[in-house]
Image (tube, rainbow, N blue to C red):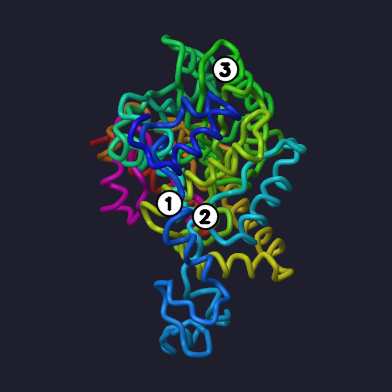
Amino acid sequence: MAGLNPQAEELNHIIKAHNSTVYELLSRKGKGIYFPRKGILAQGIAAKGKEINATIGTAYEDDGKPMVLPSLARRLELDTKDAFPYAPSEGIKPLRDKWQELIRGKNPSLGTAEISLPVVTCGVTHGLSMAGYLFTEATDSVILADLYWENYDLVFTNGYGAELKFFNFFKNKSFDIDSFRETVNAKPLGKKIVLLNFPNNPSGYTPTRGEGEEITNVLTEAAEAGNKLIVILDDSYFGFNFEDGTFTESLFSQLARSHENLLAIKVDGITKEEYAWGFRVGFITYGIKNGSVELYRALEDKTAGAVRGTISNAPHLSQSLFLNALQSGTHEKEKESNKEKLKGRYLKCKEVLTAHKEYKAYFEELPFNSGYFMCVRLKNLNVDKVWDLLLKKYNTGVICYSEKNLLRIAFASTPLDKIEKLFNNIYAACKDCASS
Ligand SMILES: Cc1ncc(COP(=O)(O)O)c(C=O)c1O
């Protein structure tokens, strides 16, 4: 490509030499981006530790501490140097190392397969957007389930011009593997971008172990057939599995080592997994069969460049706070305790739905076993009307998916003792609607 910055060309050269498919999969923007190591940043690094360092765009006190406002610093127990100065665009190194270690721990079947160091993003949405920046062209389609988080429209279609192409999620209360296979293998052979989100928003579904393996097989076979695949795994709700027999690892653990024509991109974060929605810390991690450290370093550099060119860097304060929490000694226990609460709400939904056979006259639940949400599908009723009645007459807010005739219920945010009332209100609103 003519006109590229030499640093971008250098990264492209490394990527091409280590896996030409990954190079081909990069978008024009992805091919053009680089982390500007040789400019101001390099001169800043060169000046580190010198008697006079007049390079950096951060104000320091005469004693070398960050110059801060006491009214901002007062409530922080952290050292100001771990919160106020910029974090690196790729994220703070101890957190990146730790998150990689956690990914390995939570996904043991990754084994010793080489994966990249995670690059820190400003939440999961930004991580998805960075995957779009690097790998999505306006002529591309993104293949995903027909039940999906609506923000994918804004990220991939509005942001990068890609068309969303859907497979049917459920058939006979199971993952519709045939629809998935057909959609992935639709002609022509070539670049395919697949976006998977388990546990899923809005359905609350995670594939069973068998289904997870089938999904991996479909994607691997598509790569064997000559397709070149990007598989983005939105693992926002990782770990919220409430039933035995579901696929509790990320599909990244399989896909990161499945085929040299398949680049797996794990996008996750502390938003849901660590109950820190407003902290805005996400991660983007790469894995491909026989991926080398050099390939991953080049991808990390491109990603850090894309981060630098969009938000510059993610909040240092949030990264440090989370790193501290990981080292607290109580973190795991606290997480388990929260998960137990969510599981209690999940089980309550199941119990109420089993106990109230009368609901079936008006609605039925879609399969759910994990995550934050579940959906009910209304039978021959106007879902918008039911939604409106719920708000106005029953003081109850849920999310309405008009085209799918679904209501999404966030059980994770509903107090346990309100869950039965919530379903009873839906039933009552449906009954009103049916008789009006
Ligand atoms: C499937 C899915 N992905 C990503 C996100 C957004 O994550 P973040 O808040 O970290 O951007 C959400 C939030 O609702 C989500 O449901």
Give the number of the disc on residue 90.
2
Can I make out residue 23 in this image? yes
Q: Residue shown at 62%/39% (left/top)? A: 294
Mark before the other along the chain sequence, 3 or 2? 2
Instruction: Point out the image quarter for the N terminus.
Output: top left
Locate residue 68: give its quadrant: bottom left
Q: Position of residue 355 (x, y in %)?
A: 57, 40
Given the image, on which type of amino acid does mark 2 rest?
A: Glu
Locate residue 40: give its quadrant: bottom left
Given the image, on which type of amino acid does mark 1 rest?
A: Val
Which stretch is magenta?
A: 386-414
Please name whichever residue, 235 or 31, is drawn nearer the observer in this view of the structure: 31
In the rendered view, tell whether residue 150 sits above or below residue 183. Answer: below
The answer to whether the residues at label 2 and label 1 have Cβ atoms under 8 Å apart is yes
Query: Cα distance, mark 3 to mark 1?
Result: 29 Å
Residue at mark 1 = 307
Q: Position of residue 256 (x, y in %)?
A: 64, 32
In the rendered view, tell whether residue 203 sits above or below residue 319. Answer: above
Mark before the other along the chain sequence, 3 or 1? 3
Residue at mark 3 = 223
Q: Residue shown at 58%/39% (left/top)? A: 286
Query: Cα distance, mark 2 to mark 1?
Result: 8 Å
Q: Is residue 412 magenta?
A: yes
Q: Is residue 171 magenta?
A: no
Tell me the element at label 1: helix
Q: Position of residue 49 (x, y in %)?
A: 58, 76
